[in-house]
Amino acid sequence: MLNSLRQTFRWTGGLAEQRRLVSALARILPVSTLLIGGASCSLPAVAALNDTISPFIATSYSYDDNFFRLDDDVRGINGQRSDSSRQVQAGFIVNRPIGRQILTGQAKWSRVYFDHFDQLDYSGKDFLADLEWHIANHLEGHAGVSYTQTLTPFSDLQTTDRNLRTVRREYLNGAWRFHPSWRVRAGFSRERYAYDLITQRISNRQEDSTELGLDYLQSGGSRIGMQLRHLKGSYPDRAGLAAFGVEQGYEQDEVKANIYWFASGITQVQLLGGWVKRKNQVFTGRDSSGANGRVTVYWAPLGKVRFTGSAWHEFAAVENSLVSSSLNNGASIAAAWDISAKVRMDAQFRRQKRDFSAATGTVLPGDIADSTRTTTVGLTYAPRPNIQLGVNAFHDARVGAPIINTGSYRAKGVSFSASGQF
C-alpha cells in the first residue's frame, strides 16, 4: 500500500532540486500555509483533492533553554545550552472506503533546521496505513504498518552527534462476536527500533507481541474482559556483550483484566491491569514479577471542558547503554477547554518515577531511580475549519540517577505552529 502511495506522489527531480525546494519551503511556508488555507476555504471545490486524499502543510518554530538536558551545574556544549529550531512539514491523509472495508493512512515528510547546533539538522518521515476489515457480520479487525524517523530525545543520551531513531511496526488483529454479548479476539504486532548513531545501536531492538482476549459486552457500551499477552524482546547488536553484564533479550507474560466502564455520558473508566512476569534471556537473577496496570478516567462535567486522568505501574524499555528496562510508576492529568468555536486551551501535568530493576551486573546501590515532572500548556486558534495556529509552552524537570547516566536537569521552552489542510 505504501509503495503505491509513494509511486503516486513520486518526486521526479534530482537531489539538488529537492534541496532547493525544501529550502524555499522553509522560508515561505509560514505565509503560504495561511494563503493556501484561506484560498481553499473560499473555493469549496478544491477543499480536498477528492474524497480520498487530503494534502496538508505545516510549519513551526521552537525554543528550548536546555536542549541537551544537561545538569544545572554543567556550563553547556561550547558554552551553549539553548537552541531554537524551525520545522517544515508536508503530506497527505488518506481515507478510502472499499466496500465494507476502510483504508486510512498518512504520509508526512518534514525537515528540521537548528539555529546553533546545525549538525543535527535532519529529515523526518512518518507513514501509516491501516485497513479496517469486516467479514460477514461477526468478524472484524485491523491490519496495518507504520514507519517513523525522527531525532532521538536527549533525556537519556547526551551527545552532540545526530542520532536518528527509526520505528517500524506491523500488526494484525481480529475479533469474532460469536454471541450478542460475547467476543473473542486475538492479535499480533512487531515493533523494530533502530538508531543511527553507532554508539547507540546497542539499543536496537525488536519486540513481538501476541494477545488473546475474551470480552463480555454490555448493552450500555461497557465491557468486561480478560487478556493474555506474551511479549518477546531481542537485541540483535548485543552479541558477545553478555560477559560485560549486558542483557541479550527478555520475555514478558501478562494476565490482565480489560475493563471499559461507561458510567455515564460524562464519565468513562478504562482499566488494563493484572499480573506480569518478566524474564531475562541471560541474567535470570534480574527477573521480576508483580502487579502491572494502567487506569484512565475520562470526565467531561461541562460540554466545553474535558479531563483525562491516568495512573500506571508498568515495565518499560529504556534507551540506555547500561540498563534495558525499568518499572515505571506515574500519573498524569490533562484538561481541554473549548473557549469558543475557534479557540481551545490544553494543559497537562505528568509525573513518573522509573525504578531501574534491570541492573548491569556490577554492584550498584539498591535504589537506582529517577523522577520526572512535566507541565505543558497550549492554545490553539482555528480561524478557518482547515487552518490552525498554535502556541505551546512546557517545563520539564528530572531528579536523576547519575550512576547510570540519567542526570538531573531542568528545561523549559515554547513553540509556535501553523498548519493548513486543503
Image (cartoon, helix red, strand yellow):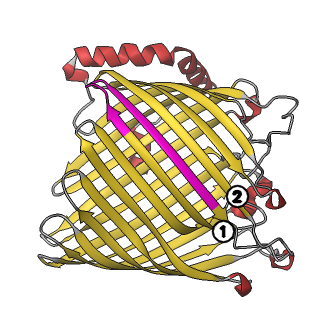
Examine the rendering and report whether any part of residue 21 can be seen. yes
Element under disc 1: strand
Q: In the picture provided, is 384 more to the left or to the right than 293?
A: left
Examine the rendering and report whether any part of residue 1 can be seen. no
Residue at the farthest bottom position = 284
Give the residue at x 54% y 68%. Answer: 314
Q: Earlier in the sequence, mark 1 or mark 2?
A: 1
Q: Nearer the viewer, mark 1 or mark 2?
A: 2
The main secondary structure of the magenta stretch is: strand
Residue at the farthest front position = 301
Please state which amino acid type lies under the numbered disc 1: Ser
Q: In the picture provided, is 74 more to the left or to the right than 196?
A: right
* Neighbourhood count class around disc 2 (C-alpha, 10 Å): few under 14, some 14–19, many 20 upward: some
From the viewer's perspective, is residue 271 above or below residue 6? Answer: below
> Whole-percent x and y of residue 379?
43, 27
What distance separates the C-alpha of mark 1 from that of mark 2? 13 Å
Residue that label 2 marks: 370
Occupied quadrant, residue 42: top left
> Whole-percent x and y of residue 354?
65, 62
* Neighbourhood count class around disc 1 (C-alpha, 10 Å): few under 14, some 14–19, many 20 upward: many
> Whole-percent x and y of residue 324?
69, 68
Please state which amino acid type lies under the numbered disc 2: Asp
Q: In the picture provided, is 16 more to the left or to the right than 188?
A: right
Give the residue at x 77% y 74%. Answer: 239
Magenta-colored span: 336-353
Residue that label 1 marks: 325
Give the residue at x 26% y 18%. Answer: 41
